[in-house]
Structure formats: C-alpha cells, structure tokens
Image (spheres, rainbow, N blue to C red):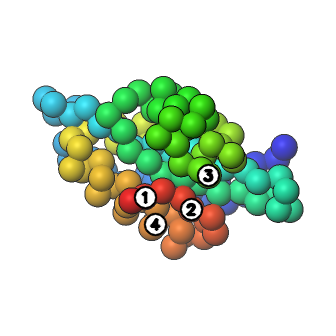
Amino acid sequence: MREPEWLAKAEQIARCFRATTKNQRGALHSVYVVLLHDPAKAGRWGLYVGQTSRDPDWRFDQHKTGYKASGAVKRFGVRLLPHLVDHLNPMMQWESLEIEAALANALHDGGVAWVEGGH
C-alpha cells in the first residue's frame, strides 16, 4: 500500500499553523489527522481532521470501534498522522475548534481531494 504523493504537501500546509494557547494552563485539547484509504475506489486516499480532549490515539481507537465515530474513519481510517500536528498540541478548546476547521479547509484548498471532519 503506497501512500499518496500529496502527503508531503499536506505536512507543509499543517506546519504553517500555530496554536497561540499551546501548553497554557488548562490547554487540554488536541487536533489530530487520520490518513484515510478506500481501496475499492482506485486507491482513493484522504484525510480526516478532528479535535479532542482525549489522547488522539485513544480517540482514533474509539472511531475504529464505532464509539462517537466518523463513518469515514471507522471504515477507511488507516492511522494517525501525528507529525502533521504535534507542533500544535495541546491547546485550549476554542482554538482547537478553530484550527480543526481551518486546517481541513487549507488541506482541501491545497490539493487534498478527500478531506473529512473539520467541523
């Protein structure tokens, strides 16, 4: 399974984001990105952008087991891509919501055809 060529571009886009509340007292939220793959559609690849107050690994496991899951992550989630967002986390909830939405939009505008989440 070969990962998509646009993944390096996605990392460049994510690296442009900054969290002003990173590591502040009470900063408990994280933004996370999941690599999606649908082998039934000619190797369709994409990204899911989410935010959580939990550990992103735990939240990914919740998606995969169906608990408060994104359908896209449950069905097509391959793995987390922490290197895209580790420089942001943890942050305050309000900022995680803003960055989640802005990052999803930026990734789509930057050439990732299939972007889920970001709400």
Q: Quick one: SS at disc 4? A: helix
The image quarter containing residue 90 is top left
Circle 4: residue type:
Ala
Residue 86 vertical position relative to residue 7 in the rendered view, above or below = above
Nearest to the eye among marks 2 and 4: give it: 2
Tag 4 residue: 106
Residue 76 vertical position relative to residue 16 in the rendered view, above or below = above
- Tell whether 86 sits left or right of 73: left
Residue 54 on image: x %, y %: 37, 29
Residue 107 vertical position relative to residue 90 in the rendered view, above or below = below
* Image marks 2 and 4: residues in contact by CB distance under 8 Å: no
Label tally = 4
Q: Tag on residue 118?
A: 1
Tag 2 residue: 115
Q: Quick one: SS at disc 1? A: loop
- In the depicted view, which residue is nearer to us: 1 or 62? 62
What's the distance in space between the residues labelled 4 and 3, CA to CA?
A: 19 Å
Q: Earlier in the sequence, mark 4 or mark 3?
A: 3
* Image marks 1 and 2: residues in contact by CB distance under 8 Å: yes
